[in-house]
Image (cartoon, helix red, strand yellow):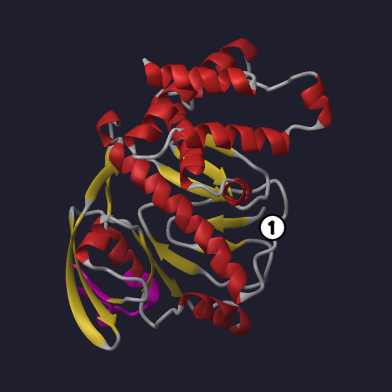
Amino acid sequence: MGVYFTLYAIKLVKIMPKPILILIALMLVAGCTTTKLYAPPETVNGLRDQYAQFNRISAITHNILVANVSLCSKTKMDYGFTSMSVNGEGSEDQKDRWVKAFNLHEQPTVTYVIPKSAADRAGLRTDDAIISANDNLWSDVQSPGAFTKLLTKARQSPHLHLGVLRDGKMKTLDLTAEQACDYSFTMSLTNEHLAWAQNKRIVVSLGAAKLLKRDDELAFFISHELAHNLLGHTLPERKKELGDDKMRRILEEDADALGIRLMVRSGYDPEGAETAIRHTDLIDSGPITRLFNYHGPYMPIDKRILYLRKVLGE
């Protein structure tokens, strides 16, 4: 069991006694066990670096889910911001590290605003302390958790009226949600270079985010996995097909074809798909794999890239 990033909480599971629960109010999900025991960052800078990758994946996923909403049968409200609050659990040292890393206030604190999102357009800013949400006052509730639930419910509505404290002054902001595909994402806290689709969830590893420096590279990873979801490849009744090598290759080709289109519709450079494929092949292929030219369910690298170019040329 590793660290979980979940819809409203980052939990340090079986790593620390009495963990700090960081409550995250956002419309994007994160949460996945890893294949290795994960040691959370022990420094303020380490926490910030990890969270920066989480935010990067959040923003790319947001852009793709909003830009391709017309292809989805079910949609959700998306405001494009993250907020955190800390409860009283955990050691003072742990709590102090989180507070310093993200400049957390007593009230829920906005820790990230996705550029050009609904929240950004409405003027919400990082470090804003949220003191009310759709007329529910933070000062009126009996616990931080209770207000977080109210904020969560408010974010499911098409309009969000927020009261925030910024530099000691109160501001009121009116946000109108964007429609996005009703899928969530997960950042898996492992250094392996992986991305996969799981039910209605897109999973991207921390290692992949670190390896793929360009956003358009990471966008191809995410778009490919969204394509698996849109094409129904993750449905329980398709499970047997995943175990058939020939059928699996067909599924991956189909996901490549739709994935490259999804990323282009989202404004990302398709060249990122090519460099992402080459980067991961270079890192993840061992000498035996290269000797036998084995690429698992995927086409050989050069053939796969030519296939993607052909898809866009159609």
Q: Tell me: 168 left or right of 291.
A: left
Q: Is residue 25 magenta?
A: no
Within 10 Å of disc 1 (Cα), the crowding (few <14, some 14-19, many 20+) is: some
Of residues 25 and 66, the one nearer the viewer is 66
Q: Position of residue 232 (x, y in %)?
A: 42, 23
Q: Position of residue 225 (x, y in %)?
A: 48, 33
Of residues 86 and 28, the one nearer the viewer is 28
Q: Position of residue 54 (x, y in %)?
A: 50, 56
Above or below for 297 versus 175: above
Over which residues does the magenta segment extend? 131-147
Q: Residue at x 18, y 67 (%)?
A: 134
Q: Tell me: 310 left or right of 163.
A: right
Above or below for 90 versus 209: below
Q: Residue furthest bottom?
A: 168
Of residues 201 and 255, the one nearer the viewer is 255
Q: Is residue 144 magenta?
A: yes
Q: Residue at x 44, y 21 (%)?
A: 257
Residue 299: quarter of image: top right
Mark 1: which amino acid?
Tyr
Q: Tell me: 309 left or right of 124.
A: right
Residue 95: quarter of image: bottom right
Residue of label 1: 38
Q: Is there any visible trace of residue 144 in the rendered image?
A: yes
Q: Residue furthest top?
A: 246
